[in-house]
């Protein structure tokens, strides 16, 4: 993990510990001593294991007497009812951290799993599945890391990485051409991507030396027409976005495009059901 990701995890971990008040767990304090306890982590459904490094870092920074041993590598496909790790440590500390630990692992594995499931549907293997900035506030670095574990790629991390002219920029400037004229007058060396919602907007965009066109919410017939027009301009990349679900990606995954961006993989990913069980 890089330093930025560690910092993000630490921030969320500290917030989670305070939120759950793990140091005043009155149930565990009154029932469990600090003698050693061994537990297992089990996938209750099939999916991609993601977050091993995150959880290990989390545990180490919570209590260095707790040890976790993983049975599988990061990114492994795990079958239902499989033990993925064992945990040993002071019983009162292990049980106090249970929910925080599982919340992290269920969420991270859930994002990696839905990303993996989308990637499996792509027939044209030159297409890269991208995430978006539709992430949980404070969780972006973690969620984008999970996308990569699941087989996807990261779109821009933040607003400073790429000039991406979206629909509201275009509306505010009264059209695609006005927006592009203004941005190219700035003589930036940063690549420019523009979102278009119609073939007429596309034709306007192709008058300029843009890096990538995002075809947003176009019908499949219009996507095919757009691809034909864009491929007349060598070097211009094609990204498809807007309402991409399992059904739609099947229809477009054989097309001659470079990227498909999917907000669902971060903003609507279901968590994987994972449990922690005491062994002894």
Image: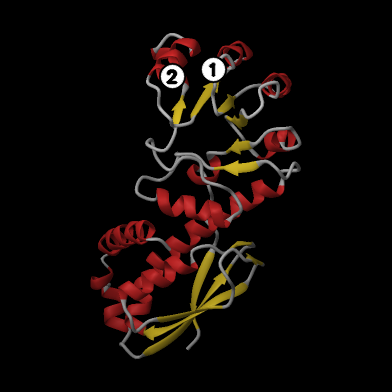
Query: Mark 2 = which residue?
Result: 184
**Could you say where residue 191 lies in the image, as x and y percent from the top left?**
48, 31
Looking at the image, which is closer to me, 134 or 258?
A: 258
Residue under the point 36% across and 71% down = 97
**Could you say where residue 205 lies in the image, as x and y percent from the top left?**
55, 16
Query: Mark 1 = which residue?
Result: 208
Q: Mark 1–mark 2 contact, CB under 8 Å?
A: yes
Residue under the point 56% across and 67% down = 74
Looking at the image, which is closer to me, 74 or 266?
A: 74
Residue under the point 57% across and 14% down = 207
Q: Earlier in the sequence, mark 1 or mark 2?
A: 2
Mark 2 packing: few (<14 Cα in 10 Å), some, or many (20+)?
A: some
Which SS class for mark 1?
Answer: loop
The image's mark for residue 67 is: none
Quarter of image, res 181? top left
Q: On the rendered image, what quadrant is the N terminus found in?
A: bottom left
Residue 64 horizontal side relative to residue 191, left or right: left
Name above or below for residue 139 compared with residue 274. Answer: above
- How is the model colour-coded? secondary structure
Looking at the image, which is closer to me, 75 or 156?
A: 156
**Could you say where residue 210 lies in the image, as x and y percent from the top left?**
54, 24
Residue 216 horizontal side relative to residue 179, left or right: right
Which SS class for mark 2?
Answer: helix
Quarter of image, res 225? top right
**Could you say where residue 211 lies in the image, as x and y percent from the top left?**
55, 29
Name above or below for residue 41 compared with residue 269. Answer: below
């Amino acid at each position: 993990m890089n330093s930025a990701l560690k910092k993000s995890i630490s921030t969320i971990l500290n917030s989670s510990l305070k939120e759950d008040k793990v140091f005043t767990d009155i149930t565990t304090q009154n029932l469990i001593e600090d003698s050693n306890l061994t537990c297992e982590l089990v996938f209750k459904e099939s999916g991609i294991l993601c977050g091993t490094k995150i959880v290990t870092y989390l545990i180490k920074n919570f209590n260095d007497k707790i040890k976790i041993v993983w049975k599988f590598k990061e990114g492994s496909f795990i079958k239902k009812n499989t033990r993925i790790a064992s945990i040993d440590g002071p019983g009162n500390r292990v049980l106090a951290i249970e929910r925080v630990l599982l919340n992290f692992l269920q969420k991270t594995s859930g994002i990696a799993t839905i990303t993996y499931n989308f990637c499996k549907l792509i027939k044209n293997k030159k297409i890269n599945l991208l995430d978006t900035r539709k992430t949980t506030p404070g969780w972006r670095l973690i969620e984008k890391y999970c996308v990569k574990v699941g087989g996807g790629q990261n779109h821009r991390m933040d607003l400073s990485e790429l000039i991406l002219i979206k629909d509201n920029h275009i509306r505010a400037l009264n059209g695609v051409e006005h927006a592009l004229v203004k941005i190219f007058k700035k003589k930036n060396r940063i690549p420019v991507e523009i979102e278009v919602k119609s073939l007429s907007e596309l034709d306007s965009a192709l008058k300029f030396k843009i890096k990538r066109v995002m075809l947003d919410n176009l019908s499949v017939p219009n996507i095919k027409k757009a691809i034909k027009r864009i491929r007349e301009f060598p070097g211009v990349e094609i990204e498809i976005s807007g309402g991409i679900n399992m059904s739609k990606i099947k229809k477009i995954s054989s097309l001659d495009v470079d990227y498909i961006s999917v907000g669902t993989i971060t903003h609507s990913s279901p968590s994987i059901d994972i449990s922690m069980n005491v062994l002894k």
